[in-house]
Amino acid sequence: MATWNSRGLRGSTLEELINHTNELYREKGLGLVQKIPTPITPVKIDKENGNISLAYFEKDSTVDYIGVVQGVPICFDAKECAVDTFSLRNIHEHQVKFMEDFESQNGISFLIVMFTARNKFYYMRFSELKVYLDRIENGHPMNFKYEELDKEFFIKPEAGAMVHYLRGLQKDLSSRD
């Protein structure tokens, strides 16, 4: 994947792993989940090699991925964190609103967070994200810590999928019944 010295392509390692997992899910008939491209307008293009060297985002994007798994509509965003404290500033208000609206239509919204220093992946239910966001109103810092996370929702590689998030999705669905 091309790199761009911009905040816009952070998380590309995680996205590559998720893209591979989603392709595996498609091949096995488990689901169809697509990466949503971020709409950009190129401003400066290096004519020699065709690379975009300067661009701006056309509008706020929604989430990174959207699709359906065994008839269940899902959407999620992929986030990387280099330390054990995840800043909620990395989740934008328009993304939360989109996930909230998606949930109101009986879809399932979540985050996949990669703690890069630990090489650990986490399935964060939308309800859990809302708890962390809501507590900010009570003076809590705009973050959550690795130690706070529910051990049941850490993602383990399985059957060739490095980010096998379907187990987390199944637990999420079961907790809603």
Image (tube, helix red, strand yellow):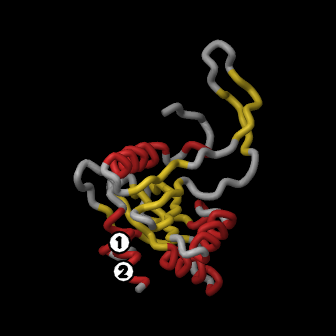
SS of the residue under disc 1: helix
* Depth order, front residue of 153/115: 153
Please provide percent x and percent y for residue 57: 72, 44
Q: Which residue is mark 2?
A: 174
SS of the residue under disc 2: helix
Q: Seen in the image, is 156 located left or right of residue 165?
A: left
Please provide percent x and percent y for residue 75: 52, 62
Please provide percent x and percent y for residue 86: 49, 64
Q: Are marks 1 and 2 in contact (CB under 8 Å)?
A: yes
Please provide percent x and percent y for residue 66: 53, 57
Q: From the image, which quarter does the C terminus lie in?
A: bottom left
The image quarter containing residue 106 is bottom right
Q: Seen in the image, is 51 located left or right of residue 131?
A: right
Q: Residue at x 60, y 45 (%)?
A: 37
Q: Seen in the image, is 103 located left or right of residue 52?
A: left
Q: Which residue is mark 1?
A: 170
Q: Residue at x 47, y 53 (%)?
A: 33
Q: Amino acid at mark 1?
A: Gln
The image quarter containing residue 170 is bottom left
